[in-house]
């Protein structure tokens, strides 16, 4: 009896793992838009977010187990909801104009900001519900709770992951910029300076600034 | 050690009080072995249910919310002579890279840059504070970033004050 129950759960877990395994190959749209060849995938981004969260969360004396789990699930919704960028829906077909827009951090009216956020949240919530629907109630509950804590920033861990996510993104952008100085690094810096408000990340981005701009500019 | 203050708008405070009320009701009903009515309410997001079902998380969240309420400082509109200066609660119209944006300067708990709610502890938020219309605020960075302040108002806060 116990064997068949365990077998049943493992089958569902395997299906789940095959599904989320797609993220290992799914290239991040932000890099595709900038014409990066063989760009970082969502799985690769998640890997470094998890390590960053561990190292920085340990310093902050946060719950590292929760941080790592939260980092691992933070982009799972993208399997169904896709990888959104702030440029979605505003890029013209004209390549020259497209480049101009991608060189800037996009600005929107308040109503457009609300509309975009609600649309995104709805799609991501539906995606995560669909993704975990076949898992056992215990696993489902754990993933959903971690997802809510991250997505709503309900805990110190959730808040840190939200900001580590963007900081890892900046680090990757800086690595691309280091290889090719035509890479438009400016929008990443603007986003970070408007967003980060966790002390350890201030120091982190200051170090990134020193390492990349002072050394390689 | 001096405890950190949590700056909240009146709306933010109400939201926290409402959440605490819901979670306390849930905890008490659960202790009595009942299924709380709140879970049957249409207002509650179904995805939120699993979160509320986990008592350990509920307890942690209740403790966090109580801590926040203990050290809350409500953001109020400044005196008329100081309303031309950016401070917490200000809505600031800025120009940057030939683009216009509107920021609301809020405390870290209410910050949500996707909605234009910038934390007073972020680099941009704290740099804007103390400046007036016409000022060009430079953010320290290897990538030059200058925000020109076009307009400052506290209408949002005043509106909330009148409602309250």
Image (spheres, coloured by chain):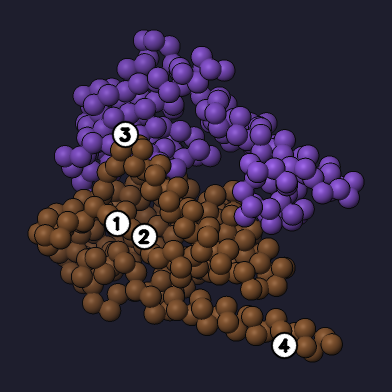
| Pointer 4 chain | A
Label 3 sits on residue:
B102
Distance in Å between CA atoms under marks 4 and 2? 36 Å
Tint applied to chain A in the drawing: brown
Q: Position of residue B81 (x, y in %)?
A: 36, 10
| Pointer 3 chain | B
Q: Secondary structure at mark 2?
A: loop
Label 2 sits on residue:
A84
Q: Answer with left or right where residue A171 lies relative to residue A99.
A: right
The tally of labels here is 4
Label 4 sits on residue:
A7
Q: Quadrant of the C terminus of chain A?
A: bottom left
Q: Label 1 near label 2: C-beta < 8 Å?
A: yes
Label 1 sits on residue:
A88
| Pointer 1 chain | A
Seen at 35% across and 25% down, the residue is B86
Label 1 Cα crowd, 10 Å radius (few <14 / some 14-19 / many 20+): few
């Amino acid at each position: 009896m116990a064997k068949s129950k365990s077998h049943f759960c493992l089958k569902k877990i395997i299906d789940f793992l095959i599904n989320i395994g797609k993220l290992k190959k799914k290239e991040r749209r932000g890099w595709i838009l900038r014409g990066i060849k063989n760009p970082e995938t969502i799985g690769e981004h998640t890997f470094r977010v998890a390590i960053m969260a561990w190292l920085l969360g340990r310093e902050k004396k946060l719950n590292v187990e929760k941080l790592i789990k939260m980092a691992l699930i933070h982009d799972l919704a993208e399997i169904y909801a896709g990888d959104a960028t702030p440029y979605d829906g505003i890029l013209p077909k004209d390549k020259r104009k497209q480049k101009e827009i991608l060189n800037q951090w996009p600005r929107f009216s308040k109503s457009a900001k609300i509309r975009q956020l609600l649309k995104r949240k709805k799609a991501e919530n539906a995606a995560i519900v669909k993704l975990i629907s076949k898992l056992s109630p215990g696993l489902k509950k754990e993933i959903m709770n971690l997802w809510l804590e991250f997505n709503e920033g309900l805990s110190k861990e959730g808040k840190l992951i939200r900001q580590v996510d963007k900081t890892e993104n900046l680090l990757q952008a800086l690595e691309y910029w280091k290889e090719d100085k035509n890479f438009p690094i400016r929008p990443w810096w603007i986003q970070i300076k408007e967003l980060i408000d966790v002390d350890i990340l201030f120091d982190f981005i200051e170090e990134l600034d020193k390492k990349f701009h002072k050394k390689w500019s | 050690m001096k405890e950190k203050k949590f700056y909240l708008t009146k709306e933010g405070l109400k939201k926290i009080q409402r959440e605490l009320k819901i979670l306390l009701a849930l905890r008490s009903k659960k202790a009595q072995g009942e299924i709380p009515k709140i879970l049957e309410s249409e207002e509650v997001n179904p995805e939120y249910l699993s979160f509320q079902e986990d008592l350990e998380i509920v307890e942690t969240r209740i403790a966090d919310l109580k801590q926040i309420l203990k050290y809350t400082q409500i953001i109020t509109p400044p005196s008329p002579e100081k309303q031309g200066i950016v401070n917490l609660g200000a809505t600031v119209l800025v120009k940057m890279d030939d683009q216009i944006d509107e920021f609301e300067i809020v405390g870290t708990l209410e910050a949500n840059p996707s909605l234009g709610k910038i934390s007073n502890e972020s680099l941009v938020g704290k740099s804007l504070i103390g400046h007036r219309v016409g000022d060009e605020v430079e953010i320290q960075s290897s990538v030059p970033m200058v925000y020109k302040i076009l307009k400052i108002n506290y209408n949002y806060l005043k509106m909330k004050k009148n409602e309250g």
